[in-house]
Image (spheres, rainbow, N blue to C red):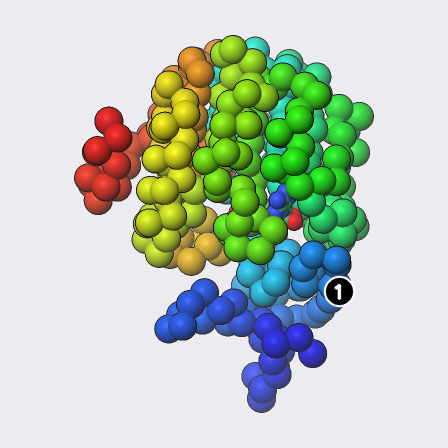
């Protein structure tokens, strides 16, 4: 049994080892998938409190209970800011939750998902329908490659790039490098915009600021927004927007929202930050 799983008199548990003094235990009903790809350990577990969940190298990536909060926030914010997005690139996103949200926009003609590990897509399409929605939209193209390699030589100019990466360790470590954000800038249309998940303001404040600073150094406009995702350590989660032009949600597009979590009020308020975050980012104003 992998080190992340253990059994005691109360049953089977998956322990997310957040840091030396913080471990998070999830009680598990059933192990649906437990495998090793060439890159990482992959599990789909059915948990008592969060339903089915994707776990990579012992870290919970997304769950049936709250995956939609993160997936809707990271996709509907940029898609409601750009007035007419046609080509969207998703880096990472192997659980297909973000691509499922992007498919809701009729203006979008092409959705390229650059995921480094095909096993993640395979197991999520098959065993995590609450998140992946069994994605089968003809506009979606899976490209199994390292996101860094792809954007360096992107064959396409995109209107929106969404970096839906796992924590910046292992294969995702390169997805917070400044050179990566510069490649994204070059892969965007003249009025394009990028959003990336930028970790926990509570537990990963330094990495969050590092990401914001790197994006801020490259894009003419940079904004941070948040959502509360119960699965992620500390709940409060940050997203960084880098834009060549647009930054204000478009009224008309916000009316098109088809979502469980985001709505016009959320879209208007998610850029309002807690005071500690404003203070931390004030030097970049
Ligand atoms: N929403 C989740 C979160 O916030 O943690 C993550 C979604 S998705 C599961 C993250 C994906 O990024 C994983 O499938 C992982 O394989 C992929 N990934 C990690 N490093 C990558 C890289 N360098 N290029 C492309 N995909 C990568």
Residue 55: x and y, percent? 62, 59
**Which of the 4 image quarters holds residue 188?**
top right
Residue 102: x and y, percent? 62, 28
**Which of the 4 image quarters holds residue 89?**
top right
The C terminus is located in which quarter?
Answer: top left
Q: Secondary structure at mark 1?
A: strand
Q: Report how many numbered discs are placed on residues in the image.
A: 1
Residue 247: x and y, percent? 39, 19
The reply, left or right, for residue 108 in relation to residue 213 is right
Residue 32: x and y, percent? 74, 64
Vertically, is 217 above or below 201? above
Vertically, is 156 above or below 8? above
**Which of the 4 image quarters holds residue 138?**
top right
Vertically, is 126 above or below 59? above
User: Which residue is depicted at the point 32% across and 53% down?
Assistant: 202
The N terminus is located in which quarter?
Answer: bottom right
Q: Which residue is mark 1?
A: 35
User: Which residue is depicted at the point 29% across and 32% down?
Assistant: 272
The reply, left or right, for residue 132 in relation to residue 261 is right
User: Which residue is depicted at the point 58% across and 88% down?
Assistant: 9
Tag 1: Cα neighbours inside 10 Å, few (<14), some, or many (≥20)?
few
Residue 156 visible in the displayed image: yes
Vertically, is 55 above or below 142? below
Residue 228 visible in the displayed image: no
């Amino acid at each position: 049994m992998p080190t992340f799983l253990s059994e005691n008199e109360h049953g089977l548990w998956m322990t997310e080892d957040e840091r030396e003094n913080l471990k998070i235990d999830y009680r598990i009903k059933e192990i649906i998938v437990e495998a090793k790809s060439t890159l990482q350990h992959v599990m789909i577990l059915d948990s008592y409190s969060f339903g089915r969940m994707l776990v990579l190298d012992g870290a919970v990536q997304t769950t049936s209970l709250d995956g939609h909060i993160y997936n809707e926030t990271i996709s509907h914010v940029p898609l409601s800011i750009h007035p007419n997005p046609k080509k969207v690139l998703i880096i990472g996103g192997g659980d297909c939750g973000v691509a499922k949200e992007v498919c809701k926009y009729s203006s979008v003609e092409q959705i390229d998902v650059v995921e480094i590990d095909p096993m993640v897509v395979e197991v999520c399409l098959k065993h995590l329908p609450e998140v992946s929605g069994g994605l089968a939209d003809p506009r979606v193209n899976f490209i199994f490659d390292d996101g860094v390699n792809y954007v360096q030589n992107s064959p396409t100019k995109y209107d929106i790039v969404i970096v839906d990466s796992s924590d910046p360790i292992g294969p995702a470590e390169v997805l917070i490098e400044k050179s990566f954000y510069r490649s994204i800038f070059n892969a965007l249309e003249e009025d394009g915009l990028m959003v990336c998940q930028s970790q926990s303001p509570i537990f990963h404040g330094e990495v969050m600021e590092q990401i914001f600073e790197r994006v801020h150094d490259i894009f003419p406009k940079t904004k941070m927004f948040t959502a509360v995702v119960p699965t992620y350590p500390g709940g409060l989660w940050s997203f960084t927007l880098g834009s060549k032009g647009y930054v204000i949600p478009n009224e008309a597009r916000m009316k098109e929202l088809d979502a469980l979590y985001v709505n016009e009020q959320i879209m208007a308020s998610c850029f309002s930050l807690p005071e500690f975050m404003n203070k931390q980012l004030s030097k970049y104003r």
